[in-house]
Image (cartoon, rainbow, N blue to C red):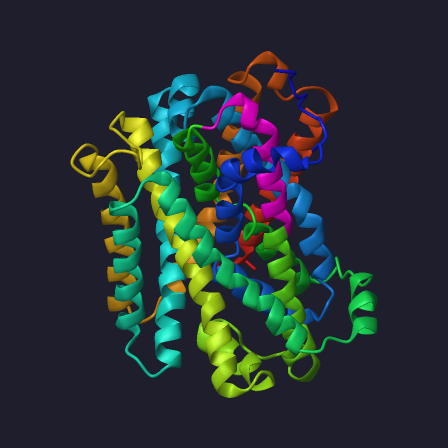
């Protein structure tokens, strides 16, 4: 097989190779759709409501950055055949692996709080107790994983994630002002503290620890081979574009509606966001369409976050950790998955006010970025075959992008702590 250089281009997919591409398709698209989770949707909505279209350009700029980061996980998974936690243990020792997977667990738990809070919000939109949506969602997630192989879980995740396309319809129904949109693309307020806070928040919503663990482990669990590398990169590239276009659609929808009439509107919950957007779509249909998007975003992100934690701990401890094993064959893997899922349910159902927890989790995620990206880049230099290692100008590009992303993430996390902003 002809090698693909580290800075090689994404060659077009020829029709005769479409069957192979469709077989490889999955890990990248799943993790990217999960990236547009409930918290990311709310962040994009706040961006549009408060700043109109002035943060729209950032959503487009983040496409290649997201691809560069997640492509490294594809490369590591395909050319080593190992998950992220297992590779850290092999290259840097068990202690660092446990540090990394502990951070992953915190990030995954935080993600579940956000996703299940979204499901709870959808329940309350339709006059149901919050626990109904949370329990039903968690039960569905548990059954999907416990009873399925990797490919079956992947297909269901893609179906759930496809619900997010409703945000394109919402943006269209909002009738954005095209002149205002293009004008807003050129307006950047780098000197404004509040603006920069949302810049940091949007960057933090793009790169999350559980995404890196999930995609590398998924590539290994799916059994992708070096011959699949080109198609796997396309899978990741398409996912990077789609997820950021969804973020852009949410931003456009709120910029065209409440951003034009009430830029100070509070959009911290699903209910507030729905109340702000659905009047422009019609109350009943608006709530249905909006709820589908939130459910899709929350469910696929919950699948990815919980599986990432289960895979991570399995890789570090050495226990069986594959969806190809039955629960009786990999009890620790499925037990970890179930425990993380149950913890998320209990927190959302029984803790009435999750605001303080959400802030703490966001700060922790931001502070974890240097560690997460540092490991990812170090592994790409040390553990890959020579012809696929980071080198030359592409190495320095990745280091620069990682440094800027981690720096802004830490800045956003630290300044979000009350008393430090």
Location of residue 396 by image quarter:
top right
Locate residue 169, reporting x and y percent: 61, 71
Q: Is residue 47 visible?
A: no
- Image quadrant holding the C terminus, namely bottom right
Specify whether 359 is left or right of 9. left
Specify whether 188 is left or right of 256. right
Decide: is 37 above or below 379: below
Decide: is 381 above or below 48: above
Location of residue 125 by image quarter:
bottom left
| Residue shown at 57% from the left, 27% from the top | 229
Specify whether 166 is left or right of 298. right
| Residue shown at 62% from the left, 67% from the top | 168
Outermost residue on the top side: it is 386
Locate residue 123, reporting x and y percent: 35, 75
Please state which of residues 57 and 286 is positioned toward the viewer in this rendering.
Answer: 286
Residue 238 among magenta residues: yes
Locate residue 145, reporting x and y percent: 29, 47
| Residue shown at 65% from the left, 49% from the top | 241
Outermost residue on the left side: it is 328
Locate residue 225, reporting x and y percent: 49, 24
Say how many tags the image has: 0
| Residue shown at 45% from the left, 72% from the top | 291
Please state which of residues 83 and 381 is positioned toward the viewer in this rendering.
Answer: 83
């Amino acid at each position: 097989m002809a090698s693909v250089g580290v800075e090689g281009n994404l060659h077009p997919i020829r029709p005769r190779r479409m069957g192979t591409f469709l077989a490889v398709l999955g890990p990248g698209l799943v993790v990217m759709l999960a990236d547009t989770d409930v918290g990311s949707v709310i962040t994009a909505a706040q961006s549009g409501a408060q700043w109109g279209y002035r943060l729209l350009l950032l959503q487009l700029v983040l496409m290649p950055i997201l691809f560069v980061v997640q492509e490294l996980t594809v490369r590591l998974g395909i050319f080593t055949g190992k998950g992220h936690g297992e590779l850290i243990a092999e290259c840097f020792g068990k202690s660092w692996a446990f540090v990394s997977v502990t951070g992953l667990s915190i990030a995954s738990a935080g993600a579940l709080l956000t996703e299940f809070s979204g499901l709870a919000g959808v329940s309350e939109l339709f006059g149901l107790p919050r626990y109904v949506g949370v329990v039903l969602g968690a039960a569905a997630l548990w059954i999907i994983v416990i009873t399925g192989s990797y490919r079956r879980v992947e297909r269901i995740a893609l179906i759930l994630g496809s619900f997010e396309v409703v945000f394109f319809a919402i943006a269209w129904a909002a009738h954005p002002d095209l002149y205002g949109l293009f004008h807003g693309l050129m307006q950047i307020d780098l000197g404004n503290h509040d603006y920069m806070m949302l810049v940091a928040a949007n960057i933090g919503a793009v790169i999350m620890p559980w995404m890196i663990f999930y995609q590398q482990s998924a590539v290994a669990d799916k059994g992708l081979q070096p011959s699949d590398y080109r198609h796997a990169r396309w899978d990741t590239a398409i996912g990077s574009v789609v997820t950021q276009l969804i973020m852009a659609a949410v931003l456009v929808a709120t910029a065209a509606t409440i951003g034009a009439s009430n830029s100070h509107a509070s959009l911290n919950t699903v209910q507030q966001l729905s109340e702000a957007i659905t009047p422009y779509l019609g109350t009943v249909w608006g709530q249905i369409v909006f709820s589908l998007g939130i459910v899709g975003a929350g469910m696929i992100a919950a699948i990815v976050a919980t599986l990432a934690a289960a895979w991570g701990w399995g890789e570090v401890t050495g226990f069986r950790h594959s969806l190809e094993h039955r629960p009786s064959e990999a009890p620790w893997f499925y037990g970890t998955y179930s425990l993380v899922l149950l913890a998320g349910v209990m927190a959302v159902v029984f803790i009435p006010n999750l605001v303080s927890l959400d802030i703490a989790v966001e700060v922790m995620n931001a502070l974890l970025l240097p560690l997460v990206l540092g490991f990812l880049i170090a592994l790409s230099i040390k553990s890959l075959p020579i012809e696929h290692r980071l080198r030359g100008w592409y190495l320095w590009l990745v280091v620069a992008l990682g440094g800027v992303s981690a720096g802004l993430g830490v800045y956003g996390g630290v300044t979000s702590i009350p008393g430090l902003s």
